[in-house]
Structures are given as structure tokens and as C-alpha cells.
Image (tube, grey):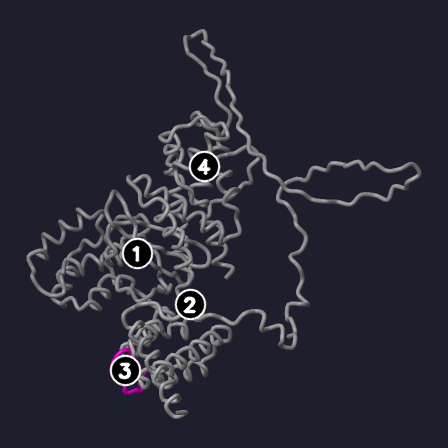
């Protein structure tokens, strides 16, 4: 009987494991991993707390002037005064103020009418403080337009939904231009940029929002496509020209454009075209549209001319482009994210214990190698670089007997130069976590408001979200930045953000 009970228990365990495996393969949730109760810790010996010697949060220092108020105490006669005990209280005052400016109007002897100007910062019937509050709540606070209207009305502001919409898009040219200047500064001076994209709705259609940035700046651009043509167009940072130079021709050769086709472009004296219409006319005259070969000569030539334009404006001349292995980002000096590379191994479907053991072994080797690369970034030297390259080959040339895993390792081995870019450029991060963190605000905005309906709204959203992220990376309060740009009375002066980006990059 004891043996039968043992066999039944073993069979139950096998059935349970098979059910979990079937659920995993079907994409269903497995059994919850319930952690032991905290009561169990009471029976264990106390552990030394490493944080006992750490300092507290420190003294609270408000960013505004402090008003002092003396609070009297009722004391019996004969008591002695022993000074004051400070107790700091921070509060917020929200009030609405309406001002009617009685502007003097004069008529000069020659018949001209002179009207007294409004105070600085007053444009329209809503003041700069209200504009700043609206922009702050909508873009950084991720509020919706109906909720913002309801909140303003509840505190006494007489405003309509249409008027609020205008406040969000007024003075857009200044913000959009500054965001573009930030992008240009980043592309000109940064040693690396990290890029990513996510879905975005615009005019009721699906589009894509591309993020470009690093530790000092962030920029967003929403377009209808996520192709390489689109990415190269964004990298021009507002310039509309097409340029044929050495960088353009090298790009075409790397994309396997026939030498005879490239020779047609090189034989022409004209190398710079002001806009897309002029470039397309040039290709038509050379007969590119009539060619039916692979790769598409019009597409490759256009991509090359766009890359030539990027280089001619001295953007990304020596910088590394770090991505998650999306094909449209593979241009110039390209590096790959190690987290996304390892995720391919992690997501492999395994079917038996041997496969799972091989997967676990390879994942362990990859993360150990990743830790060594992190250490190398802090103290790079040539000897360690050679050793790490040899170690990379040993990891990704191995054969585990798991065919799918072996093919994946061979694929990652082919990306050796991009995965090991950090050995040549130690300042390059090993992952794209920065991009994913930056683009999260666009994802939140998409979930909150679904999408934009006009090009003006799209550009304002992208510009202000990017400027808010750039302010945060440079230690600037977005509230102060908006006050400076809207000329709020008593505002803190903030220089153009591209100045901070250039200064931070030089200091790094």
C-alpha cells in the first residue's frame, strides 16, 4: 500500500507539471507564485539592516519664500519664555483673478490714434499664469481636455472647450522651433543617441511616434510611417534638402545598389536638391523610375540622399545610434540593445527538460557576459576588449543540441559588431531603457486622449512632451520653463534648452 501511495503521488506531480506546461504553451496563466507569509520571518534570527547607518531625507527646503507667523500660547502667570519651536507647513492657494485693463486712447493732432499697450505677457483674454497652468496640467500632468475644462470652471474661470483648445495650441511655433533646436543640438554634439517608436493615432488613422534622445535631451516626431525613409527624414531635423556626397554613395553601396546605377548619379554635376520635388525630377530625368530591379533604385537612392543630407548638416557624424534591432534604425554606427537580444532567448518555446536546461545555461552565460561589459564601461582597456571578443565567440558559437536555440545564437553572432559596439565606444549604453522610459509619456497620452485630430495638435503634443523630458534631464522645472517662455511676472529666466544640451554634452 505504501508503494501505491508513492506511485500515486508521483503521478499527480507529473500530471501537474504537464498541465502547467500545456498552459504555458497556450499562453495561459500558470499557478500563482504565492510568497510565504511575513509571519514566518518572526521565527528567524534578526538580520542586520544595511540601511541603519543611512541618512534620512534631510531638511525640507521650499522653493518659495517662507512667511513667518507667531502662534501665541495661553500660559499661567509667572511662566518663562523659552523661544519658539518652528513647524513648517506648505500649502497651495488656487484663486481666480479677473482684471479689466482700461487702456487709454488718444488722438494726435495729425489724426493718428494711440492706444496704451497691454502689460508684457498679456495676449488675448487669458493671462500667462492661466496659460502656464493649462500647459502644465495637460502635457506633464497628462490631464484630458474635458476634465481640465471642468476643473477650471469649478474654481471660477469662465472658459469654453474651444477656448481651452486654443490655449493649448497658441504660440506653438516657438515651442516647436525650440524642440527642433534641441534635436539639432543633440544630433550635432552627442556621442550617442537612443531611438525607439510606438503606435500613435492621428486624424483617425494609425501612425507611429519616433523617439530620439539620450541622457541630455528627448525629441518626439509622429508620422504616418515607421520606414527607414521616415527615420532618415526625421534625422534631418527640419531640413528639407537632398544631398549626394561620399556618405550617400557609401550608403548606396552598402545597400547593394548596382555600381552602374550609382555611376549615373556620380556623373551628374548637381549634388544638392532643395526639396523632394526637385529630387524626384532629377531621378525621373535619369530614368530611375523606369528601372525594375532589386533593390528598388528609387528607394535606395532616396535613402542615400537623405543620409547625405544628415551628414552634410554635421548630424551624427561620429555618434552611435542605439536601437532594439528594428530594421529602420540600422544606419551609420549602429549598436544593439542587449536586453532585447537576451529577450529572444528568454521567449523561446522549450519542449523538454533538455531544451529548458540549454536555454537556462545560455541565458546565464549571456547575463554573466553582460555584467562583464558593464564593468568594462567603467574601466575600458585594450586587453580586456580582446578577451571579451573571444568570450563572445565562445558563447554564441556553441551548439546546444536545441536547433531553434542554435539558430538564434548564430543570428546573434552575426550581430557581433553591433552588440560589441561598447568595446570601441564605452560611452554607449548597453540597453535602450532610456528610450523606453522617455516614450512612456507618449503611450500614456495615447491611452488618455486616444490621438490628435490636427497637425497643429500633433506638433504641439510632440514638442511640449519632448521639452518637458529635456527640462527634467537638465534639472529644470517645467513650471519655471513655461513661466519664462510665457513671460509670467517674476518668472525665472531659462535660456533656450539647446544651450543646456550643448553644455551638458561638452561637460560629459
Q: CA distance from mark 2 to mark 1?
A: 21 Å
Sequence-earlier tag: 4 or 2: 4
- Looking at the picture, how far across and down is residue 136, in whole percent? 47, 41
The residues colored magenta run 396-409
Q: Secondary structure at mark 1?
A: helix
Sequence-earlier tag: 1 or 3: 1
Residue at 42% over, 77% down: 367
Identify residue for label 1: 310
- Asked whether, in this view, residue 304 is left or right of residue 163, the answer is left
Identify residue for label 4: 134
Identify residue for label 2: 428
Is-magenta flag for residue 406? yes
Task: Write down the quadrant of residue 258 in the picture.
Answer: bottom left
Sequence-earlier tag: 2 or 1: 1
User: Is 63 located above or below residue 35 in the figure?
Assistant: above
Q: CA distance from mark 3 to mark 4?
A: 55 Å
- Asked whether, in this view, residue 403 is left or right of residue 118, the answer is left
Identify residue for label 3: 406
Q: Nearer the viewer, mark 4 or mark 2?
A: 4
> How many other residues sit within 10 Å of disc 4, few (<14), some (14-19) or many (≥20)?
many
Q: Nearer the viewer, mark 1 or mark 3?
A: 3
Q: Can you name the residue that lies furthest to the right here?
A: 78
User: Is 116 located above or below residue 160 in the figure?
Assistant: above
Sequence-earlier tag: 1 or 4: 4
Q: Secondary structure at mark 4?
A: helix
> How many other residues sit within 10 Å of disc 1, few (<14), some (14-19) or many (≥20)?
many
Q: Nearer the viewer, mark 2 or mark 1?
A: 2
Q: CA distance from mark 1 to mark 4?
A: 36 Å
- Looking at the picture, how far across and down is residue 142, in whole percent? 42, 45
Q: Secondary structure at mark 3?
A: helix
Q: CA distance from mark 1 to mark 3?
A: 39 Å
Sequence-earlier tag: 2 or 3: 3
Amino acid at each position: 500500500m505504501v508503494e501505491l501511495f508513492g506511485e500515486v503521488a508521483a503521478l499527480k506531480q507529473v500530471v501537474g507539471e504537464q498541465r502547467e506546461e500545456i498552459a504555458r504553451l497556450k499562453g495561459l496563466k500558470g499557478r500563482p507564485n504565492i510568497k510565504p507569509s511575513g509571519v514566518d520571518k518572526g521565527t528567524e534570527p534578526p538580520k542586520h539592516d544595511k540601511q541603519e547607518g543611512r541618512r534620512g531625507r534631510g531638511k525640507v527646503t521650499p522653493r518659495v519664500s517662507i512667511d513667518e507667523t507667531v502662534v501665541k500660547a495661553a500660559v499661567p502667570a509667572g511662566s518663562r519664555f523659552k523661544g519658539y519651536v518652528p513647524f513648517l507647513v506648505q500649502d497651495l492657494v488656487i484663486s481666480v483673478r479677473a482684471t479689466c485693463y482700461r487702456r487709454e486712447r488718444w488722438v494726435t493732432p495729425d489724426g493718428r490714434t494711440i492706444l496704451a499697450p497691454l502689460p508684457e505677457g498679456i495676449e488675448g483674454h487669458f493671462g500667462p499664469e492661466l496659460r502656464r497652468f493649462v500647459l502644465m496640467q495637460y502635457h506633464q500632468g497628462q490631464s484630458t481636455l474635458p476634465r481640465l475644462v471642468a476643473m477650471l470652471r469649478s474654481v471660477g474661470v469662465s472658459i469654453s472647450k474651444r477656448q481651452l483648445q486654443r490655449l493649448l495650441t497658441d504660440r506653438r511655433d516657438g515651442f516647436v522651433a525650440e524642440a527642433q533646436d534641441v534635436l539639432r543640438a543633440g544630433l550635432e554634439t552627442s556621442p550617442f543617441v537612443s531611438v525607439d517608436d510606438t503606435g500613435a493615432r492621428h486624424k483617425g488613422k494609425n501612425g507611429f511616434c519616433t523617439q530620439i534622445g539620450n541622457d541630455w535631451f528627448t525629441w518626439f516626431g509622429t508620422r504616418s510611417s515607421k520606414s527607414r525613409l521616415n527615420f532618415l527624414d526625421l534625422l534631418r531635423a527640419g531640413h528639407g534638402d537632398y544631398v549626394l556626397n561620399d556618405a550617400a554613395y557609401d550608403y548606396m553601396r552598402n545597400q547593394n545598389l548596382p555600381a552602374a546605377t550609382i555611376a549615373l548619379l556620380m556623373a551628374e554635376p548637381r549634388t544638392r536638391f532643395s526639396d523632394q520635388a526637385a529630387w524626384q525630377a532629377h531621378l525621373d530625368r535619369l530614368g530611375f523610375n523606369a528601372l525594375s530591379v532589386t533593390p528598388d533604385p528609387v528607394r535606395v537612392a532616396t535613402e542615400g540622399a537623405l543620409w547625405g543630407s544628415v551628414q552634410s548638416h554635421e548630424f551624427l557624424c561620429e555618434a552611435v545610434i542605439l536601437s532594439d534591432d528594428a530594421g529602420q534604425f540600422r544606419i551609420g554606427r549602429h549598436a544593439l540593445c542587449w536586453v532585447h537580444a537576451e529577450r529572444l532567448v528568454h521567449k523561446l518555446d522549450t519542449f523538454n527538460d533538455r531544451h529548458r536546461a540549454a536555454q537556462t545555461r545560455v541565458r546565464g552565460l549571456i547575463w554573466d557576459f553582460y555584467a562583464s561589459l558593464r564593468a568594462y564601461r567603467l574601466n575600458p582597456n585594450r586587453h580586456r576588449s580582446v578577451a571579451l571578443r573571444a568570450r563572445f565567440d565562445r558563447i554564441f558559437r556553441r551548439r546546444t543540441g536545441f536547433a531553434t536555440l542554435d539558430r538564434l545564437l548564430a543570428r546573434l553572432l552575426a550581430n557581433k559588431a553591433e552588440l560589441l559596439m561598447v568595446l570601441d565606444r564605452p560611452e554607449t549604453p548597453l540597453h535602450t531603457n532610456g528610450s523606453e522610459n522617455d516614450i512612456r509619456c507618449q503611450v500614456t497620452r495615447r491611452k488618455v486622449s486616444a490621438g490628435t485630430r490636427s497637425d497643429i495638435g500633433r506638433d504641439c503634443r510632440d514638442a511640449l512632451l519632448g521639452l518637458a523630458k529635456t527640462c527634467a534631464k537638465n534639472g529644470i522645472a517645467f513650471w519655471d520653463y513655461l513661466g519664462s517662455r510665457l513671460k509670467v511676472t517674476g518668472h525665472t529666466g531659462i535660456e533656450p534648452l539647446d544651450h543646456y544640451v550643448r553644455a551638458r554634452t561638452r561637460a560629459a
